[in-house]
Amino acid sequence: MTQPEALRSLLEAVAHGKVTPEVALDSLKDLAYESVGEFAKIDHHRQLRTGFPEVIWGPGKTPDQIAQIMAVMRQRTAVVMATRIESDVYTILQKKVRGLQYFELAKICAIAPPIIEPRFDGIIGILSAGTADLPVAEEAAVTAELSGFRVQRLWDVGVAGIHRLLSNRHLLESVNVLIVVAGMEGALPSVVAGLADCPVIAVPTSIGYGASFGGLAPLLTMLNSCAAGVGVVNIDNGFGAAVLAGQILRTCEKLR
């Protein structure tokens, strides 16, 4: 009942006398949130408000807590996702949660249909500067795909070998929003924003030598970009970048 289509159908059924107000009230009574034990309150209303369902943050939760939260969420939404799930935690979870998928590089667990058809127009392009940035880049890619968006990946095109990026200019020209993931000095988003005519979301990663200060150096580089049209998310926040890219595309649909 947290899906807009299902809520509209229920309201129309009440309006036409096919469902009583009492039955509708029973369906909606837990719409705002639902408690799971004494450790979580699931925000079922989030998809109606924002367009994206609540997602489970894995670190700090026990496998049993994650499994219980997933069991409640799967009753309300077709896709349930948990981020930052290590492989040993997944090994435990797969014994507790039926039909669980694991995207190892992205460290994402999900209950989802085998094939998710894109529900939104537009394409999200995701670039990584180096191979070591792939876990964050894949977190963004998998999040976007599970949310119903088309994704184009382009890996290992950092500025140390700029010809690798320039030989793929066609991708920059064919997508509608770009997520650019980079560690070290974090220069790639500025270069990309100087070549592309769409919004660029920069994601600094914690990859780099000591003076990168765990991602602070690329974060500052991206915040100080001389290229226009660059937005920056937090260090290693591939998930947040994907949600922001999705919001941009969904807003474009509203404006048509």
Image (cartoon, rainbow, N blue to C red):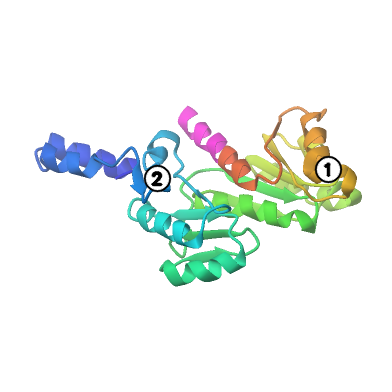
22 sits to left or right of 226: left
Q: Amino acid at mark 1?
A: Phe
- Range of the magenta residues? 246-256
Give the labeled residue for mark 2: 42
Residue 155 location (% of width, % of height): 75, 56
Q: Is residue 70 magenta?
A: no
Residue 44 location (% of width, % of height): 37, 43
Q: CA distance from mark 2 to mark 1?
A: 35 Å
Tag 1 secondary structure? helix
Whether residue 181 is visible here, answered yes or no, is yes
Q: Which SS type dominates the magenta stretch? A: helix
Question: Quarter of the image holding residue 244?
Answer: top right
43 sits to left or right of 154: left
Residue 81 location (% of width, % of height): 49, 54
Mark 2: few, some, or many residues within 10 Å (few <14, many ≥20)?
Answer: many
Q: Residue at x 37, y 50 (%)?
A: 36
Point out which mark residue 213 bears: 1
Question: Quarter of the image holding residue 107?
Answer: bottom right
Q: Is residue 102 above or below residue 156?
A: below
Q: Residue at x 44, y 39 (%)?
A: 51
Q: Residue at x 43, y 62 (%)?
A: 113
